[in-house]
Amino acid sequence: MNGAYCCGPCKPRYRRLVDSIYPNNANDGPNGANLNKLTFYASSHPEKLARIGDCILLRLCRDLARLRFNQVRVGTEAMDSLLQCCHSSPSLPQLTERHLKMIEQLLETGIPDMEELGTMSFVKFSNIEESAPSYHRQYDFFIQRFSQMCYAVGSSAEKRRISGVKGIRGLVWKSVTDDLHSNKANIWEKNHMGLIIPSLLLNLHSAEQNTMPINILMDETYGDNTKEENLKILTETCLRELMGKASFGSLRLVIEPVLRYLDDEEKWHPPPTFAIHVFRVILYSIQSKSSYYVIQELIDHLDTMATSHASVRIGIATVLSSIVSIAGTSIGPLLLSIFNSLLKHLRASVQFQQLPTCPSPEDEKTYQETLINAMGDFANALPDYQKVEMMMFTVGNIPSLADERNNRHGDVFLQHVLVKTLLKVATRFRTSYLATIFTDSFLDTLERLALVPDPQVRLITQKIFHTLLDRHDNLVILKDITLETDISDLQLNVEKCSSPDQMFMRKHAHSIMLTLYRAVELMPENEGLEQHANAISSTMLLFCIETGYDESLVELFRLCLAIQDMVLTREQEFTVLKQKTVHDIAALYLYVCASLLGIESLCQHVQEVVAHRRASNFPVRAPDGRSEDYEKGLFNRDVISDCLKGSGKDTSRLFVPFLERTASDGKMEELDADEYDGRRVEKHDSQSMGSSFDLTPPESIQPSRRNTVFSLDNTSSNHPAPRIPPKLQVLVGFPITTRSLIETLKPLDPSQEKEIDRKQTRELLTYLRRTPFEQLAEDIGRQNEEEDSSKMLARILNKKRERMQLRGELKEDHPAADEDDDESVPERRKTFFDIVYPDFVY
């Protein structure tokens, strides 16, 4: 029967139509009329599609073998036309199998023109939506062949590479456009991604080396051919489409080959421009909610490369710093995990740098700076409440500051690095209320950091205060202020202090001022003195501007006068330069504050003192005998008080000593006991706190489960009792000092409470065992009302008489006894049961 096909009239109609599309002249194109007849016949007889495909495939293989490339083009065009016109036919899967075999034949030739022809035919096929699934189709050959074409070299290398990238792009489209396709996820297998991703990255990198970088921010339409021949644009678009079509579960299969390629090709070495570009493409292509996964994978890869050379780690950290802003707030769920990983790497780098076996300490230092910048960029991409969490987390990782003498050198250096990290994060934070950021633990840590031996840490801590306090961008202006500056010409943004900030300053003003006082005292003698002085002056001025209400301003005035007295104290052995600098700090604050308050008398006093110092070469240290001329060079506390009183401010605190010197050890300590920071704490009787009677026993100052029979200050008006031992007061009394009240309000954890209970019990037992009985009786007796035996007997008889009256047992034949009782016992008040009602009520 097949032999009959040699005779034209004996051929089936579909074979005659197929033969008719080929031109007689080998250089001509397909016969358009006959091609239309073929497509019409195929759409009318879908059962003939498979045979038509076999016929065209057989003719194409014969033409390829005989190198009739024009005839091959005709057959390819005919097959593409049949696919497009019969895309809804139920027999299309059978024709598709023949079409894919035809493309395989073209790609296996190794001829660039034929490979391009097969690639374009596959691209057209990838745009066809099939109505029926094909459960046996595989794309393994095309993935391998297109990836192989991307590595082409030679004279036609660029042409073949472009064809390979186009083929991969067609695979991506085909794998995701047909929802009914059973092999939809076939392209996302690990072995396939291991071929596709390196092929794309290789062409992207080679194109970047030969052309200028071009950033594509939006997907181009697939049919746009204006830039189709640019290898870089085509490769980048393909990579972006691949990432955009990947599901969340497939991201890891895509990211792992990217990281492996960058490792193998050593693309992490600074500057990692190519790696940054690749990850930017990835993050701009995937969904924003999945961006955090890419960040997490990159940090995990940094963990893997922890033992590699510092340049590799610097490159990975640089990529992190560059792309974190793209991820935005999507990293929120893993914030602490990511930040903890970065801090862990920072700590490990610091410890490794201190080892004598470290090959390059400078590279490790660069790596640390890069990590710090990365954490700052992380903070910049987060909302404010998460920035606070990052700062608290950083503070928690700073080495213990309790005893600097026991700190290792590595811990001191780590402290320096973490403080720089804290400053980097703080620069990204915008403070609303001071209490929001300056919590008790955070403020306490900053105050301790401001007094550590390392001058650089102290300076950075002052900068942290500047960053968090400067809510109105006044710091730039304050840094350039001198005693010659006209404050009225400056554009300082000053607003009224809010109520929450006033409450914060009432609670923490003294501790902050004391920290600033100690910081002035610890300023270096020569090198770095000016920087520290400017930093402390800026901190004082920022507190004046941001919390400028009466009580806060008076505290700052007290601080200035205490700084002035510091220089005058002969025990403070400062150099001449440091003494002048300390005087300038106080003078600068008084000058600026007086100008801002607009108190003319105070401004005049400050100007007179400053002018006198310049004219008379004011001595920094006080001479043995103070002269009148020397006194004019000092700021007068009484004059300042009168000026502030004239403006309606309470200056009673201005005369309270800032510090108290003890005679025993010569150290500067805060005022103690009943006068805390100059504020007198009144003692109250536990029996009279706003009511005439008491229903509960007095509570202990410490949160304890024990009660006690002791109370404080319960003395008679005629016989005042001597002071009860302080240890007993602390154990059992009502809060009698501000310090005790603050300690009482602090929450205690169960273990701390148990420890306090045990300590309290030991001290009480020690007091009861070692104190003589007479002294114990005397102490306890003073707390009770002093009564003689006659009054006690009268009270007992009175109670007995009342009980007898209630029972009706009191006899009327003992008037004398009643009279005697009436003389010693007051008449009992009638109760409800003693009322006599009229008879009609019953």
Image (cartoon, rainbow, N blue to C red):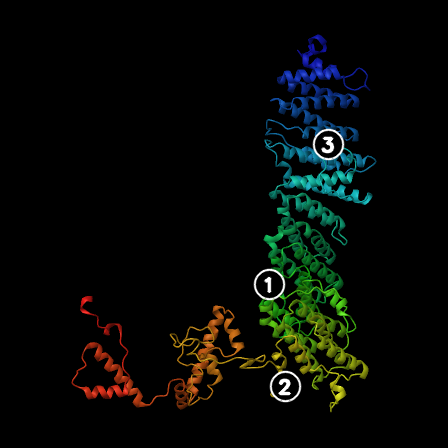
Whether pointer 1 and pointer 2 mark residues with C-beta atoms closer than 8 Å, the reply is no
- Nearer to us of marks 1 and 3 is 1
Amino acid beneath label 3? Gly
Q: Residues within 10 Å of mark 3 (few under 14, many from 20)?
A: few
Q: Residues within 10 Å of mark 2 (few under 14, many from 20)?
A: few
Amino acid beneath label 2? Gly
User: What is the x, y in percent for residue 474?
Assistant: 71, 64
User: What is the x, y in percent for residue 73?
Assistant: 76, 23
Q: Is 546 or 52 nearer to us in this picture?
A: 546
Q: Secondary structure at mark 3?
A: loop
The image quarter in which residue 448 lies = bottom right
Instruction: Residue under label 3, please give it.
Output: 223
Please tell me which of labels 2 and 3 falls first in the chain.
Answer: 3
Q: Quadrant of the N terminus?
A: top right
At 49% from the left and 84% from the top, the residue drawn is: 726
Q: Secondary structure at mark 2?
A: loop
Q: CA distance from mark 1 to mark 3?
A: 55 Å
Q: Is residue 21 among the parts visible in the rendering?
A: no
Q: Is 673 or 804 nearer to us in this picture?
A: 804
Q: CA distance from mark 2 to mark 3?
A: 87 Å
Q: Quadrant of the C terminus?
A: bottom left
